[in-house]
Image (spheres, rainbow, N blue to C red):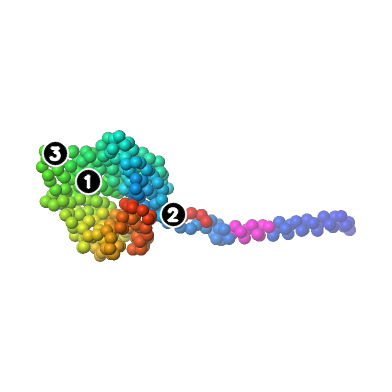
Amino acid sequence: MIDKITEFRLKMRNVVKIGVTCLAVVVMFVACDRNNGNGKEEEKEVIDVYVAGSQGRSALLWKNGVAQNLAEYPLGAGATSVYVSGGDVYVAGYANQTVNVGSNAAIIWKNGVEQSLTDGKRNAIATSIHVSGNDMYVTIRDDDWISKLWKNGVVQNLTDGISGARALSVYVSGNDVYVAGGGEYYFFGGTQKSSVAKLWKNGVEQSFTNGNENAEANSVYVSGNDVYVAGYEVNVAKFWKNGVVQDIPDGTRANSVYVAGNDVYVAGVGGKIAKLWKNGIAQNLSDGTNAAVANSVFVLDKDVYVVGTDNGIATLWKNGVPQSLTNERSSANSVFVVKQKISK
């Protein structure tokens, strides 16, 4: 026969067991709710929109509409290009760091940290940036009028300086490096010559125009085996696919090209209207009341992002809907969009 003390102890032991079991069920329920029942934490997709530009004397980077001041100097600074890779944000541009010198130095910012690519003794601008693996490529336009490509601190001259040239856009695909720009602006003997739209592939030059009229290649993009270049000749926007030219209707200048699947997007301007062309069909981004221009285009999933300037204000258009990034005189020069998954 069990005495009363032993009986009480057995009852308490059962109560503890029931309590522990209930607690385990609650914990399991909470864990299942957090993990959505599949043993994994729930994730949500986040889209970040980066825009490089300038306002006043400052180089700016907007992330989702919020401005970060990269640099501000008495004689000015600006951001021309942005690229995001592996969680790092790279921006190219310029800054007039020394008042006594009075010339811009080509600059890059990695996660906001500034690095000079030139010494500022001669005017220079970093015009475009592309990151591939551990390698960083930057095109530089300077007063030497030599088309230059900077890779991990080493400068490669793409032209010999006998006639003027400048590099405006860089794109890396596999082991191939493409640079778009212009050349043969003049001879140093004083004889003037029209500019020529050019593309350099691994340093080998290809001319898209014959020099009879002023022309320039402003942007290059590679998709598969196809090379796309956007630019202009005289006052006509041009588009080249593998070197074959196509006039862009109602366009005076093409500033940026992006390829998504089978669709080719070109951003630019027609007269004073900011424009986007999809497969050659024009869309007006502004109404023509004030001067506007589209400088850069990026496509992610089904959304099309374009940045530029409308009535002197940095503007982002998403699927044609405008958003002013500031209310002061400014410019938006480059856009890059990233989608990532984060735990809730």
Contact between labelled residues 1 and 2, with CB atoms less than 8 Å apart? no
Q: Which residues are magenta?
A: 23-32
Identify the amino acid type marked 2: Gln
Left or right of residue 256: residue 16: right
Q: Nearer the viewer, mark 3 or mark 2?
A: 3
Q: Residues within 10 Å of mark 2 (few under 14, many from 20)?
A: few
Q: Main secondary structure of the magenta part?
A: helix
Name the disc covering residue 340, or none. Answer: 2
Residue at image position (26%, 61%) is 273
Residue at image position (51%, 54%) is 343
Inter-mark Cα distance, 3 to 1: 22 Å
Q: Is residue 30 magenta?
A: yes
Dividing the picture into quadrants, the one containing residue 299 is bottom left
Contact between labelled residues 2 and 3, with CB atoms less than 8 Å apart? no
The first of marks 2 and 1 along the sequence is 1
Q: Secondary structure at mark 3?
A: loop
Q: Count of labels shown? A: 3
Q: Residue 148: x, y in percent?
A: 25, 41
Dividing the picture into quadrants, the one containing residue 326 is bottom left
Q: Secondary structure at mark 1?
A: strand
Identify the amino acid type marked 3: Phe
Identify the amino acid type marked 1: Trp
User: Image quadrant for the N terminus?
Assistant: bottom right
Disc 1 designates what residue? 200
Between 50 and 324, which is closer to the camera in this rendering?
A: 324
Name the disc covering residue 188, or none. Answer: 3
Q: Residues within 10 Å of mark 3 (few under 14, many from 20)?
A: few
Q: Residue 88: x, y in percent?
A: 41, 46
